[in-house]
Amino acid sequence: MTALTYPEHGATRAELPPGYRHVVRRVGLGAGEATFERTARALFSWDMHRGAGLTVLVAPPVEVGRVVVMRLGPRVVGPTAPCRIVWVEQEPRRSGFAYGTLPGHPATGEEAFVVEWTGDDAVVLTIRAFSRFVRPWAWLGPVLRPVQDFATARFIAALRRLAAS
């Protein structure tokens, strides 16, 4: 099994490790059980990623150890982003997972997506990530950081659309 490219496996569940760029976003998606079910299904079927504009080349069932491969752009152009699923959570009111980067990914780190149906009936998406660019991409860091922020915003917008449908 190919090793993850960073040592802090599973760190998106706790305090994000130093030495990386951190992303923490928590946004409302709507309310109610039906919205929660739709958003969890969209997350676990990779529809959120597709809806954000990524091409999902390998879309496994969301299980720990499985490898997902996405392309940052159209199917045949742009760098690939291979990741391994490092944790999965599926509870009656909370579902999500995290994946970590594998060799060949332009960054190193981990990203987690969790959908929660709260006690006050709200459905909330939390995205937690830590990352840094690797060679030869590292020198593009100042240019690519806004791209990461744009991707996070696209994930949120995609799941909001999918929650409403």
Image: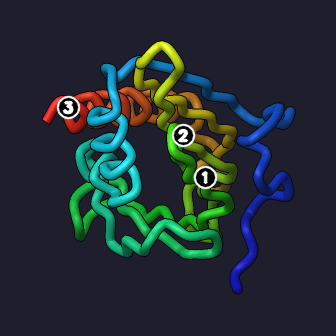
Please name which of the two marks, 3 or 2, marks the residue nearer to the observer.
2
In screen coordinates, is 160 left or right of 19?
left
Task: Tell me the residue that label 2 is attached to.
Answer: 94
Name which residue lies at 63% across and 69% down: 64
Q: Where is residue 127 in the image (x, y as percent from the top left)?
A: 54, 33
Q: What numbered label is drawn on residue 161? A: 3
Camera-nearest residue between 3 and 36: 36
Mark 3 residue type? Arg
Q: Can residue 84 be seen in this view?
A: yes
Q: Where is residue 36 in the image (x, y as percent from the top left)?
A: 36, 36
Say which label, 2 or 1, has the lower sequence index. 1
Name which residue lies at 63% across and 38% down: 129
Camera-nearest residue between 21 and 95: 95
The alpha-carbon separation of the residues under discs 1 and 3 comes to 23 Å
Q: Where is residue 22 in the image (x, y as percent from the top left)?
A: 68, 29
Mark 1 residue type? Glu
Q: Which residue extends farthest left?
A: 165
Camera-nearest residue between 65 and 22: 65
Name which residue lies at 18% across and 29% down: 164
Q: Can residue 143 be seen in this view?
A: no
In screen coordinates, is 23 left or right of 60?
right
Residue 28, picture quadrant: top left
Image quadrant for the C terminus? top left
- What number of labels is visible? 3
Q: How crowded is mark 3: few (under 14 residues within 10 Å), some or many (20 or more)?
A: few
Q: Which residue extends farthest top?
A: 120
Residue 3, picture quadrant: bottom right
Task: Tell me the residue that label 1 is attached to.
Answer: 89
Q: Where is residue 125 in the image (x, y as percent from the top left)?
A: 46, 29
Please name which of the two marks, 1 or 3, marks the residue nearer to the observer.
1
